[in-house]
Image: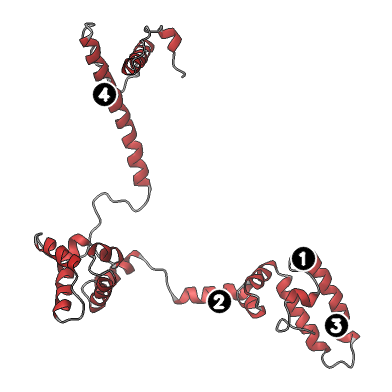
Amino acid sequence: MVTSQDKCLYEVLGIEKDASQANIKKAYYKLAMQLHPDKNQGDEEAKAKFQSLQRIYGVLGDPEKRKVYDQTGSLDDSDELAGEQFDSLYKYYRGLYRKVTEEDLDSFQADYRGSEEEAADLLQMYARFKGNMDTVFQWQICSDSKMDSHRFKDCIQNAISSEKVKRYKTFTAWAKDVDARPAPKNPLAKRKKKAGQADSEQALVAAIRGKAPTQMNGLIASLEAKYSKSSARKGKGKREPSVATEEPSEEQFAAARARLENDHAAANGEATTSQPSPKKLKRKR
């Protein structure tokens, strides 16, 4: 029996790679009848050939294992990376490494900030980006430009003095700007979340929903104020602005629309139109 070490499994069964599961099963049954030990008595290799066929069908006959084989071309990977064996392996390693929590992140940040590891990473980023501290802060983990600029500056300047890193003009200019700012009292203190900061997107949605009516009311009020002044200049007298939350009447809507059209026509040097009847300009409800 030819194994996957000599040719691919599809060639062993005598089928194409895009064969259906039904055709794979049919090819397997055909070979199984030929290679069964009972029909090959006296053939010492018959049992090994039949077992090899069983293993091949165990891969190609299972859609999940077949998919892994098509991707890797390995019979062993197909057995190990699919099915119950893979699930058991995943659960085993998942049990070794527990889920990372927010408390774990806070603990790591507290241990990392101000450590020798952080200083080594900082100098590496400094050299990599040639003193461009804006980019350094983007890459340096657990860093904040407002809280860490002064201590980062001191760390880098000490490294420059001991000739561990080069001095760059961009860093010198940045350091001068940092010296002009007051240093934080306790830069390594645990960072607190901003007041009102939510842990989900619901707060953002609520903020948007709460802001939209206010913006609409402000827009209506500004339009009313504009056209009230325009009417006063034309000698029609002052209008009392209506409450922003009230819906304008049909007449008010028609008049506002007509004024907008006339203003647009006047701006373009076109002849203005007479004010249409409110009945012709009824809005769609």
Q: Please say if 185 is above or below 27.
A: above
Give me the C-alpha separation between circle 4 and circle 3. 89 Å
Residue 196 or 162: which is nearer the viewer? Answer: 162
Q: Earlier in the sequence, mark 1 or mark 2?
A: 1
- Give the mark nearer the N terminus: 2 vs 3: 3
| Residue 63 visible in this rendered orientation of the protein | yes
Give coordinates of residue 94: x percent, y percent: 48, 73
Tell me which label, 4 or 1, sits earlier in the chain: 1
Helix, strand or loop status at disc 1: loop
Q: Amino acid at mark 4?
A: Ser
What residue did someone put label 3 on? 35
Q: Contact (CB < 8 A) between labels 3 and 1?
A: no
Q: Are marks 4 and 2 in contact (CB under 8 Å)?
A: no
**Helix, strand or loop at disc 3?**
helix
Disc 3 versus disc 1: nearer the observer: 1
Q: Is residue 56 left or right of residue 248?
A: right
The disc placed on residue 193 is none
Image depth: mark 1 or mark 2 in front: 1
**Which residue position is annotated with label 2?**
89
The amino acid type, in three-letter code, at marker 1 is: Ala
Vertical comparison of 173 with 54: above or below: above
As helix, strand or loop, the secondary structure at mark 4 comes to: helix
Q: Badge 1: few (under 14), some or many (20 or more) residues near its Cα, within 10 Å?
A: few
Q: Looking at the image, is mark 4 or mark 2 earlier in the sequence? A: 2
For disc 1, the marked residue is 19
Query: Which picture quadrant has residue 23?
Result: bottom right
For disc 4, the marked residue is 222
Q: Amino acid at mark 3?
A: Leu
Residue visible at 36% across and 37% down? 209
